[in-house]
Amino acid sequence: MHLGLSATYVLSLVTGALAIPSQQLVARQQPFTSTAITTHAEPWAFAFLPDNRILVTERRGNLRLVDPATKSMGAITGVPSVAYSGQGGLHDVALHPQYANNSVVYISYAESGTGGAGCALARAKLTLSANNAGALSGLEVIWRHSQRASGGLQYACRLLFGPDGALWVSAGEINQMTPAQSLTNNLGKIVRLYDNGTAFAGNPFASQGAIQSQIWSLGHRNPLGIDWDAQGRLWEVEMGPMGGDELNLIESGKNYGWPLVCEGKHYNGTTIPKHSTRPDFGAPKAFWVPVISPAGLIIYKGDLFSSWKGNAIITGLSSQSIVRVAITGDTAKEAQRISMGKRMRGIREDKEGAIWVIEDGANGRLLKLTPT
Ligand SMILES: *[C@@H]1O[C@H](CO)[C@@H](O)[C@H](O)[C@H]1NC(C)=O
Ligand SMILES: *[C@@H]1O[C@H](CO)[C@@H](O)[C@H](O)[C@H]1NC(C)=O
Ligand SMILES: *[C@@H]1O[C@H](CO)[C@@H](O)[C@H](O)[C@H]1NC(C)=O
């Protein structure tokens, strides 16, 4: 299954960088070619295998293996049943840092149970066979949301291994709001775990109890993207309600304020105090009113898009765009918004520095972006 489409995107004008000389501006607006590889039913995330093939999650619970060389794909069996409802289903996929030796992969997904659904994180061994087929075996749930909710909203649960070997999980607040402020649950938190799901030593609230010991930061709403920069700092994007999407620099023990402060409003129009009213909370380095609906994030580290090195590259759902944010020290500013004409869901960078994105929805295409 493939679409052989190729399109060169002509990039729109930078609004936030008028001080940059025009020659430099042209260089930074790196034009690129987009090559469609495969088409998926409601894809959510993807991860590269060492042999350049790509695991793609589809929200109903299908895990695919794509070979970009032939634009073909097969199915990986053994994914547990997922709570496909609202925003929930099969979410992220990540490889163990020693995957080449242990074949261990991680998946996050919405899981049904008493009281509704919550996010589960499982690890399993991946065995590959011919024609891009394969199977998960020995699947073991190693972490869960500590409570469940109906409605199927704001699970997030992006997975990322850090430079320290820790497994980072961005846990949404499943639309429960106030639990994001409490250390007695793991909703609306970024948690730092060992590869077996237990709390990593040295987490900031470790002395306060078992759940508390998982927590790295709190006060998050729908944290759909996390990535490292070259200095080893963790950045995060989260969706606000009506307005107030955020790009945050994540620090140990910090409270980012949801739902007590936000640059947006509740959907019923009720105002929320702004971050400026509570300087004790971590304020976003960039925010969006109206929203972009950030669904994925990389901090670009490659050489192919050399003028984008160190920038945050964010996929946007409602904005149907890729948003590039320049980071200088600990400040961040939108530098470019690239219209993609589709809701953009996931983003990753490959080892050559090409940027891959995946569209949202019924016929979401996996696209490889390379400089023109
Ligand atoms: C796999 O194991 C070999 C031998 O122990 C080691 O040299 C190599 O670094 C390991 N690879 C990874 C990706 O951990
Ligand atoms: C999980 O991994 C950590 C670090 O390797 C280890 O100290 C701990 O004993 C492990 N826990 C379990 C339950 O296996
Ligand atoms: C508006 O929505 C917020 C968040 O759900 C809720 O706390 C608040 O009570 C609502 N206000 C009104 C007037 O309905």
Image (cartoon, rainbow, N blue to C red):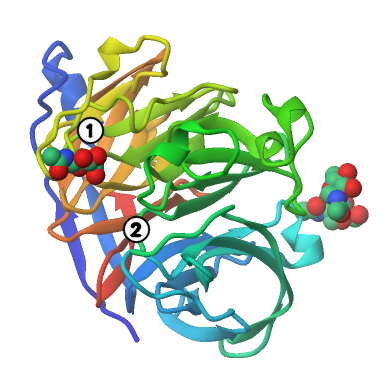
Residue name at image x 49 percent, y 53 percent:
157
> Which of the pair 311/51 is nearer the observer?
311
- Label of residue 153 in the image: 2
Q: Is residue 173 visible?
A: yes
Location of residue 215 in the rendering, given as x and y in whole percent from the top left corner: 62, 35
Residue name at image x 37 percent, y 70 percent:
43
Tell me the quarter of the picture where residue 275 sits. Answer: top left
Residue name at image x 81 percent, y 62 percent:
101
For the residues labelled 1 and 2, say whether their Cβ atoms are less than 8 Å apart: no
Location of residue 355 in the rendering, given as x and y in whole percent from the top left corner: 38, 50
Mark 1 beta carbon near ligand 3 (under 8 Å):
no
Amino acid residing under circle 2: Leu
Label 1 SS: loop
Q: CA distance from mark 1 to mark 2?
A: 17 Å
Residue designated by label 1: 244
> Which of the pair 147/320 is nearer the observer?
147
Q: Is residue 189 left or right of residue 72?
A: right
Location of residue 224 in the rendering, given as x and y in whole percent from the top left corner: 40, 47
Which quarter shows the N terminus? bottom left
Location of residue 136 in the rendering, given as x and y in whole percent from the top left corner: 67, 79
